[in-house]
């Protein structure tokens, strides 16, 4: 990969038969040509596209499909928090027991964090993404039939496995494209869009006297559609392409090991730092969005409709934050994402502090705090992934980012479960604002310390977009 962010593909030049007889062209002697191109790697055809979506119709379509995947991702993530009152009533359980749905996803995320690199080597990006979406589809399909609660908990582990794999593989894939800041922002904004739509749609169904489980029919329909699109348009993202790109990275940087051991990834301090801050951030983001609906109903005594609008407004602001931040970073903060992220951290901490202090003052001021948290929290995840890609060496980008995204994503299971455990039958939700303030303040502290120790270090050697797809 070159320092300007463009990956130079290699292909054997077609020569007349007589020239081919006189001279064999070895794989390592292949020469650069334009995109798209075909190369032969270990006896298998690999097709390389430009990493710039403007130059490739196929990459454009793939980016659109990834955005649809994240829309469904958001629709799924905001589901449990909104249907918890219906679930507790249907299964005659309390909030703490209902939160097992979050906890079971943690198991799935953990499995995804360990298996992501292996999955890429066995089936490539295509197989990893398709299998992940199929896991989600199966979960929604089973939930549609109102299974016993323990079955629902088990299949939500599949959902965690699917979402964890999607999170891990797609973020690295996007991070290796040109204009990754902008694309990452827009892609994750579609996640926020799904989270915004979900509460409104669920409340609409409930008000129409339609059972909560029917919403899962919509989810497995959308998930089935994405499975078909992935099957049709990502088949070229094979394991051979992945292995070829690893090999090329090793050739261009001999100090890299194209086959880093799992132990080397697990002992990398940067991987665990990024995993921890993502765990805190993603867990806080989803805990805030999942329980805010119940908080306004139980503690602030708002109607279900108003509470659903507040929840959706939070996700809408997060969506807008991600769209705007992608454009802002791409134009003014390229390669300086750390400063931008720290500003967001302090805004979030101050906003959650306001949300806590305004509890006895004004519901309107609390709602304003909620919206400010949503807008500021939106860019955090994609910005963190971009920073992680800039610090991790290339040979650890799939395994390292896969681990940190999956472990970080498990926070989306653990921290919402923690708040559910605290709330139990509802009155514990009074502590919800303060718990959120503590969560985001810890995140701000961690990033401040990291910035202090890393401010004089550059990462040019590893901050290189692959530029091919």
Image (tube, rainbow, N blue to C red):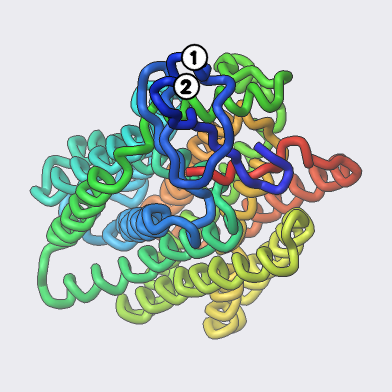
Inter-mark Cα distance, 2 to 1: 5 Å
Contact check, label 2 and label 1, Cβ < 8 Å: yes
Residue in front for this viewpoint, 226 or 338 = 226
- The residue at 56%/47% (across/down) is 175
Q: Quadrant of residue 241?
A: top left
**Secondary structure type for disc 2:** helix
Q: Is residue 359 visible?
A: no
- As drawn, 56 above or below 415: below
Q: Is residue 151 left or right of residue 190?
A: left
Residue in front for this viewpoint, 106 or 386 = 386
Disc marking residue 19: 2
Residue in front for this viewpoint, 255 or 112 = 255
- Give x and y (percent) for residue 363: 53, 82
Q: Is residue 168 left or right of residue 309?
A: right
**Secondary structure type for disc 1:** helix
- The residue at 73%/43% (across/down) is 3
Q: Is residue 75 left or right of residue 374?
A: left
- The residue at 46%/73% (across/down) is 316
Q: How many numbered marks are there?
A: 2
Q: Which residue is under mark 1?
A: 22
- Give x and y (percent) for residue 110: 44, 30
Residue that lies at the very extreme toward the front in this rendered image: 18
Disc 1 crowd rating (10 Å Cα; few below 14, some 14-19, many 20+) is: few
- Give x and y (percent) for residue 349: 69, 62
């Amino acid at each position: 990969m070159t320092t300007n962010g463009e990956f130079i593909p290699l292909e054997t030049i077609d020569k007349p038969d007589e020239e081919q007889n006189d001279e064999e062209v070895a794989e390592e002697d292949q020469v650069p040509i334009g995109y798209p191109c075909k190369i032969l790697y270990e006896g298998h055809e690999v097709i390389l596209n430009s990493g710039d979506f403007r130059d490739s119709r196929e990459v454009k379509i793939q980016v659109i499909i990834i955005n649809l995947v994240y829309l469904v991702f958001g629709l799924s993530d905001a589901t449990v928090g909104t249907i918890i009152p219906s679930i507790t009533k249907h299964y005659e359980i309390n909030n703490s027991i209902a939160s097992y749905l979050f906890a079971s996803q943690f198991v799935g995320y953990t499995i995804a964090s360990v298996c992501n690199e292996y999955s890429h080597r066995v089936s490539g990006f295509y197989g990893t993404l398709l299998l992940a979406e199929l896991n989600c589809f199966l979960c929604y399909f089973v939930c549609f039939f109102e299974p016993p609660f323990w079955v629902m908990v088990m299949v939500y582990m599949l959902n965690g496995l699917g979402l964890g794999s999607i999170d891990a593989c797609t973020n690295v894939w996007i991070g290796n494209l040109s204009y990754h800041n902008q694309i990452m922002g827009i892609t994750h904004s579609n996640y926020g869009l799904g989270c915004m739509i979900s509460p409104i749609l669920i409340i609409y169904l409930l008000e129409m006297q339609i059972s909560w489980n029917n919403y899962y029919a919509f989810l497995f329909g959308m998930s089935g559609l994405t499975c078909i699109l992935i099957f049709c348009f990502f088949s070229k993202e094979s394991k051979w392409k992945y292995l070829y790109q690893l090999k090329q990275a090793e050739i261009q940087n001999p100090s890299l090991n194209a086959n880093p051991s799992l132990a080397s990834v697990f002992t990398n301090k940067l991987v665990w730092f990024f995993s921890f801050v993502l765990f805190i951030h993603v867990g806080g983001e989803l805990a805030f969005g999942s329980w805010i609906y119940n908080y306004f109903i139980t503690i602030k005594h708002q109607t279900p409709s108003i509470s659903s609008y507040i929840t959706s407004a939070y996700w809408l602001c997060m969506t807008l934050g991600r769209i705007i931040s992608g454009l802002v970073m791409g134009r003014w903060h390229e390669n300086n994402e750390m400063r931008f992220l720290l500003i967001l951290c302090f805004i979030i901490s101050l906003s959650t502090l306001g949300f806590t202090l305004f509890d006895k003052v004004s519901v309107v001021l609390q709602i304003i705090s909620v919206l400010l948290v949503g807008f500021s929290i939106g860019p955090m995840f994609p910005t963190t992934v971009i920073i992680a890609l800039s610090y991790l060496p290339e040979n650890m980008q799939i395994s390292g980012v896969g681990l940190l995204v999956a472990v970080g994503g498990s926070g989306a299971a653990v921290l919402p479960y923690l708040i559910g455990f605290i709330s139990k039958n509802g009155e514990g939700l009074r502590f919800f604002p303060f718990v959120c303030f503590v969560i985001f303040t810890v995140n701000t502290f961690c990033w401040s310390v990291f910035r202090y120790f890393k401010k004089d270090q550059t990462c040019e050697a590893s901050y290189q977009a692959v530029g091919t797809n």
